[in-house]
Amino acid sequence: MSTNFNRDFTLVITGRNALPFANDCVESIEAQVGSYAITTYYIDDASEYSADQRAELEKILERVDGEVLFLKNRHYQIGAIAEGIRRITSPNTIICLLDADDYLLPHAIQTVASAYCDPNIAMTYGNTLVDFLPYQDNQTSYFRDKKNVNTEYPEEVWKEKSFRRDGFRCFHMKTFRKWLWDYIDQTDFLRSSGHFFRASGDSAYIFPMLELLGDPKHVCFIQKPIYVYRLHEGNVHNHDKKSQFDDLEYIRYKKRPYKELDRITLAQHLHS
């Protein structure tokens, strides 16, 4: 398969004290079917690793020609993602976000690449298994405040641009063109206190992206599961649920929605 702007991927992996999971995560990248140009950045948030642990993580990432960035200060998920994306220069690169304690199914990149064969697509999300269980069938009681996650936005939400009122639907795997990220004001990644959002930081860029694109033809919901989300003792749902809920509510009801990009600007990006 030829490598053009539709085939250039950057995986941005974020984690904190996730070394026990890192090997599985990288193995899932090694197992991807198809031939693509893939760059991998692993962002370790406020590393508490010893020198030996750092060396072990770097060795794991070497298997995919990946680079590790150790952050001294706590950035949380959204700040860590921003640090990784800062290293990406090509506006047409497809950025794929992966949590260090999760992993990809072998056809993940191939499936996302197929979606981006449509030149109108600038963003994809879904579809996720939670501990290998279909999200909607088995996990609604656990994620009781996110009953619509991992589903498509309905037509009326697109028509009214009411993504924030409707709620968060865009579960893993989240991917987008780098140029779309560049339109987001990164002060919108911060609480009123000036600190990064914590567990709901993904909402701080997902809602702006949907608003900037403004048309469902530019966003693809992946129907086939491609990503495995792990529930474990250290998962945010088990130790910081209140922070997750509070931050999401702040982003939904306190942050100002973005204006849709004009059609000329959008067409220049999509067909460059």
Image (cartoon, helix red, strand yellow):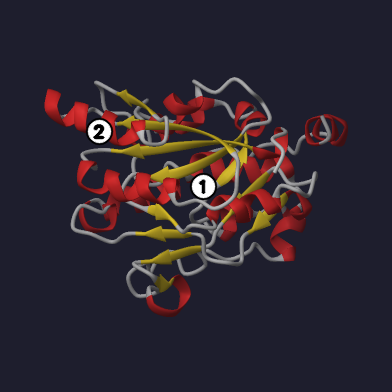
Of residues 124 and 147, the one nearer the viewer is 124
| Residue 50 seen in this snapshot | no
Task: Name the disc covering residue 253, or none.
Answer: 1
Horizontal and vertical percent position of residue 194: 37, 25
Residue drawn at (50%, 40%) of the image? 204
Horizontal and vertical percent position of residue 6: 71, 39
Q: Is residue 261 above or below residue 31?
A: above
Please identify the quadrant where the C terminus is shown.
top right
Horizontal and vertical percent position of residue 10: 53, 34
Residue denoted by label 2 = 57
Left/right of residue 7 with respect to residue 196 in the rendered view: right
Q: Is residue 102 above or below residue 270?
A: below
Residue drawn at (75%, 48%) of the image? 117
Left/right of residue 211 with respect to residue 126 in the rendered view: right
Of residues 87 and 28, the one nearer the viewer is 28
Task: Check disc 2: other Cα within 10 Å, few if <14, some if 14-19, many if 20+.
Answer: many
Task: Check disc 1: other Cα within 10 Å, few if <14, some if 14-19, many if 20+.
Answer: few
For label 2, the SS is: helix
